[in-house]
Image: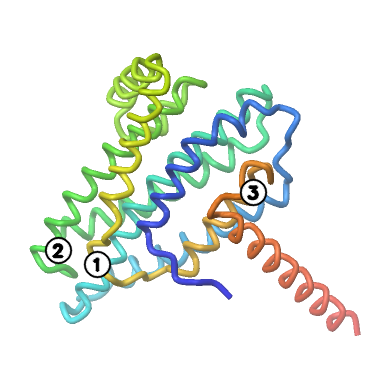
């Protein structure tokens, strides 16, 4: 049922979350269903376990250069998906700030820290160099730098609604971006067009992946769907992401049915 979702598509979702996240926070009459937060954590953890398992295998053996492109694609996935993880964790923190209670923020923080662990292990392997061609290692290092800059642009967009600089790659740079974005928004419609051009440049920068493989494609889609399930339906309706939510709901029903059947079998 799940399609292979490349990490570049997660960047598109990060832009959506940065654009709509403040609306999720400000609407204090809305509560993210506990099941949605739980679903996000489980989908994120499942992908983390998958990543860490592969990274551990690469660290414990002499990785063949025969699979260096697949190994490099895994690094691209971990590094680029971090953009969405940071932005989503920031939005969940804002959500709690507006409600003056810890409801969703701790889950976002845990997901953020788990992703940092995977990122750090991937960087260690990259510096070691064994599972990668030298040219691919250089590409990945440049990608990581690009990811950090764009992360700070998106976090800077959200800083207007609360102090979430801790989720930036460089808090000082994110605050500088925030001040610049705010000045542009004071221009009214022109400022809006500038922001649109900035995000269009962002998505264009990731439109063509460095490596064609998608090591965790279905897990990426599940993680993306679980994030979208946390938004109010009216913010999703009519967008390209509406089908993700419907698919997520269907998968949840199937999994609930499977659990019910398993419990019934155990009771016999």
Q: CA distance from mark 2 to mark 3?
A: 40 Å
Q: CA distance from mark 1 to mark 3?
A: 32 Å
**N-terminal-most mark, 1 or 3:** 1
Where does the image place residue 168, in percent across and percent down from the top left? 36, 32
Q: Which residue is mark 3?
A: 237
Horizontal side, residue 15 vs residue 233: left or right? left
Q: Which residue is mark 2?
A: 136
Where does the image place residue 217, in percent across and percent down from the top left? 43, 68
Secondary structure of the residue carrying tag 2 is helix
**N-terminal-most mark, 2 or 3:** 2
How many numbered circles does the render carry?
Answer: 3
x 18%, y 81%: residue: 66
Residue 211 tag number = 1
Query: Dot 3: within a 10 Å radius of its alpha carbon, few (fewer than 14), some, or many (20 or more) residues?
Result: few
Secondary structure of the residue carrying tag 1 is loop
In the picture, the quarter occupied by the N terminus is bottom right
Horizontal side, residue 214 vs residue 111: left or right? left
């Amino acid at each position: 049922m799940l399609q292979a979702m490349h990490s570049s598509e997660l960047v598109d979702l990060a832009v959506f979350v940065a654009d709509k996240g403040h609306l999720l926070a400000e609407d204090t009459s809305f509560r993210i269903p506990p099941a949605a937060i739980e679903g996000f954590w489980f989908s994120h953890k499942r992908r983390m376990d998958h990543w860490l398992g592969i990274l551990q295998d690469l660290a414990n053996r002499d990785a063949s250069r025969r699979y260096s492109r697949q190994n490099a694609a895994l690094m691209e996935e971990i590094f680029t998906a971090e953009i969405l993880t940071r932005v989503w964790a920031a939005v969940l923190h804002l959500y709690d700030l507006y409600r003056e209670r810890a409801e969703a923020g701790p889950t976002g923080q845990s997901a953020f820290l788990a992703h940092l662990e995977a990122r750090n292990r991937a960087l260690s392997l990259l510096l070691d160099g064994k599972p990668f061609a030298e040219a691919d290692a250089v590409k990945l290092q440049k990608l990581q730098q690009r990811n950090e800059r764009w992360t700070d642009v998106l976090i800077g967009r959200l800083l207007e609604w609360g102090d979430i600089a801790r989720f930036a790659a460089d808090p000082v740079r994110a605050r500088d971006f925030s001040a610049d974005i705010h000045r542009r928004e004071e221009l009214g419609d022109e400022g809006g067009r500038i922001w649109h051009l900035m995000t269009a440049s962002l998505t264009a920068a990731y439109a063509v992946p460095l490596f064609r493989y998608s090591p965790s494609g279905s897990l990426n889609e599940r993680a993306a769907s679980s994030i979208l399930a946390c938004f109010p339906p009216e913010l999703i309706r009519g967008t390209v992401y509406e089908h993700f939510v419907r698919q997520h709901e269907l998968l949840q029903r199937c999994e609930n049915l499977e659990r019910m059947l398993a419990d019934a079998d155990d009771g016999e």
